[in-house]
């Protein structure tokens, strides 16, 4: 049988059979075929087949019934708006007093990625601005004594909001090696109406869009030792690419943990990420963040009614974490097999795959069981890489420098315009499409970016077409 026929067979097996049993049979069959034939199942045997705007919002196909119920509860807590306390909607009050948005889904709409405003006419709402200032020693960066670690542009009535942030875009022209022109834009932040006094000139700001949140349970289940083994901090193999694990200190256990989530991998687990988001983004306290976010200097805000202490308990936090774990990865789709094959070869030849690692396996003891022992195709190594001056935010975070970012997964890229209505990429949404994202690559990825710019136009098209089939 030809490769194309095998591929079609695998695709039909998976798409054609609704039942779980058949899906895993197909997955095994595809597993044996290896390489190209395993193409569709980006998220292992729990991959979902849906090209609608709902494509990022579906549960793992193989999720057990009990986890499915928890997923549904978590789904509601993710999508429904929180309200000010006290309120009759018990269990969902405690919003603010300072906050960015009333729900997780305000930013992660349909579990997708947030959109940057096209210009300074509109307030920046669904991205966040992280903040730090030099501490007493003039060196170490610490949260701002009044504004904290993140600016909150919203506040309950009667309480001053921290800021009205706006973004304008600076265009800069560039050229491919064949002389054809391109233009890249970068954001210029304006902090209007600072509610609690001016910021010092040395303040470091980091603008970040909300990434899509599907498939993260699988990434949480990739063995830590595998990720650490991919790192090459001293660049021993001399490919110009190092890659460093993000290290976190867990105060509760006194152990080192590996950071995986967020643009600089500042969270080790989905539970921790969710608790941080409740606290900083929505103003909801939890057992992991028992204190309200306003700093002591924000007196009025401190007097606001609380929705309970904590406002979201362990049980709810677990459900939200389960929801995040349970969001499945949409299948890859072949539009043109030859282009796909050629594009994949270019992806490897240009060095993209050195960081955007195509495939890996999850742990066999991962929970829920649907996440265990899966061959997945996320196109990330979950490591930090120096991406050069162009992308730097100059705001180190733990052991991540001001030039380092965690390689983002590329799975599901083909559906981003369908789910989120745009193709904006990179940590601050500056890239308007996949090509602009590549053109911004610098630092360890400078060689890959230059190699892309040197390609004949037809090969550039082939590579982009490959990425848009993921
Ligand atoms: C104001 C917009 C906003 C809201 C509201 C918000 N997030 Fe996020 N979310 C972000 C941003 C920005 C990031 C990236 C943060 C970083 O780089 O550290 C992020 C990152 C994440 C990630 C990590 C994704 C990855 O690929 O590493 C998860 C998971 C997540 N958010 C879940 C949640 C949950 C759960 C809630 C509600 C409790 C929530 N978010 C509310 C903006 C938001
Ligand atoms: C040295 C590691 C490295 C190499 C090599 C590399 N990338 Fe990346 N890539 C990254 C990191 C890190 C980011 C995130 C940067 C940011 O957001 O500022 C990224 C972002 C992206 C994005 C946007 C993803 C998103 O979710 O916003 C795309 C698309 C992408 N890379 C494609 C490629 C392609 C194609 C190549 C080869 C030409 C390549 N990358 C080479 C590390 C790398």
Image (cartoon, rainbow, N blue to C red):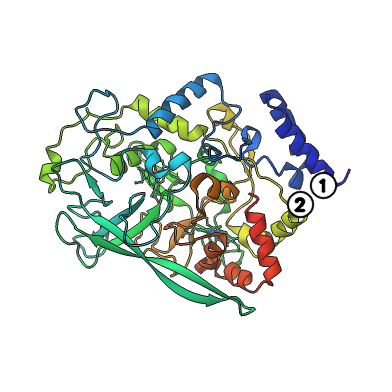
Closer to the camera in the image, 239 or 324:
324
Residue 268 visible in this rendered orientation of the protein: no
Q: What residue sits 46% from the left and 30% below the top?
A: 322
Q: Is residue 246 above or below residue 96?
A: below
Using the numbered discs, state the Cα–Cα distance from disc 2 to disc 1 in whole angstroms.
7 Å
- Of all residues, the one furthest to the top in this rendering is 66
Residue picked out by circle 1: 4
Q: Which quarter holds ligand 1? A: top left
**Tag 2–tag 1 contact (CB < 8 Å):** yes
SS under mark 2:
helix
Residue 101 visible in this rendered orientation of the protein: yes
Residue picked out by circle 2: 337
Ranked by sequence position, the earlier of labels 2 and 1 is 1
- Of all residues, the one furthest to the right in this rendering is 1
All told, the count of numbered labels is 2
Residue 318 lies, in percent from the top left, at 40, 28
């Amino acid at each position: 049988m030809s490769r194309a026929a095998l591929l079609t067979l695998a695709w039909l097996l998976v798409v054609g059979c609704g039942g779980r049993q058949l899906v895993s049979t197909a997955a095994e069959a595809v597993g044996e075929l290896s390489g190209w034939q395993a193409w569709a199942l980006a998220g292992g045997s729990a991959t979902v087949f849906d090209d609608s705007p709902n494509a990022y919002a579906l549960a793992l196909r193989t999720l057990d019934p009990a986890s499915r119920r928890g997923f549904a509860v978590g789904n509601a807590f993710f999508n429904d708006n929180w309200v000010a306390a006290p309120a009759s909607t018990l269990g969902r009050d405690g919003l603010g007093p300072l906050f960015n948005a009333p729900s997780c889904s305000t930013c992660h709409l349909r579990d997708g990625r947030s959109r940057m405003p096209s210009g300074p006419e509109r307030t920046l709402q669904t991205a966040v601005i992280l903040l730090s200032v030099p501490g007493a020693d003039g060196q170490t960066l610490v949260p701002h004594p009044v504004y904290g670690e993140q600016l909150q542009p919203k506040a309950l009535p009667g309480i001053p909001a921290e800021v009205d942030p706006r973004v304008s875009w600076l265009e800069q022209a560039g050229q491919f090696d064949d002389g054809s022109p391109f233009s890249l834009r970068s954001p210029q932040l304006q902090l209007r109406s600072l509610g609690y006094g001016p910021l010092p000139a040395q303040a470091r700001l980091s603008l970040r869009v909300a990434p899509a949140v599907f498939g993260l349970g699988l990434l949480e289940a990739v063995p830590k030792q595998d990720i650490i083994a991919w790192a090459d901090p001293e660049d021993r193999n001399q490919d110009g690419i190092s890659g460093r694990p993000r290290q976190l200190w867990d105060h509760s256990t006194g152990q080192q943990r590996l950071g995986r989530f967020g643009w600089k991998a500042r969270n080790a687990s989905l539970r921790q990420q969710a608790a941080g988001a409740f606290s900083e983004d929505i103003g909801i306290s939890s057992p992991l963040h028992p204190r309200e976010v306003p700093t002591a200097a924000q007196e009025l805000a401190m007097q606001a009614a609380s929705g309970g202490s904590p406002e979201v308990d362990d049980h709810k936090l677990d459900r939200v974490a389960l929801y995040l774990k349970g969001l499945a990865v949409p299948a890859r789709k072949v539009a043109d097999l030859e282009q796909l094959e050629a594009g994949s070869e270019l992806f490897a030849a240009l060095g993209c795959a050195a960081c955007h690692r195509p495939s890996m396996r999850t742990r066999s003891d991962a929970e829920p069981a649907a996440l265990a022992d899966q061959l997945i195709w996320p196109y990330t190594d979950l490591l930090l890489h120096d991406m050069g001056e162009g992308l730097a935010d100059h705001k180190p975070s733990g052991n991540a420098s001001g030039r380092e970012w965690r390689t983002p997964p590329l799975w599901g890229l083909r559906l981003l315009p369908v789910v989120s209505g745009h193709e904006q990429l990179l940590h601050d949404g500056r890239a308007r499409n996949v090509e602009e994202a590549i053109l911004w690559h610098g630092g360890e990825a400078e060689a890959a970016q230059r190699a892309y710019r040197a390609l004949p136009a037809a090969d550039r098209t082939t590579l982009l077409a490959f990425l848009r089939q993921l």
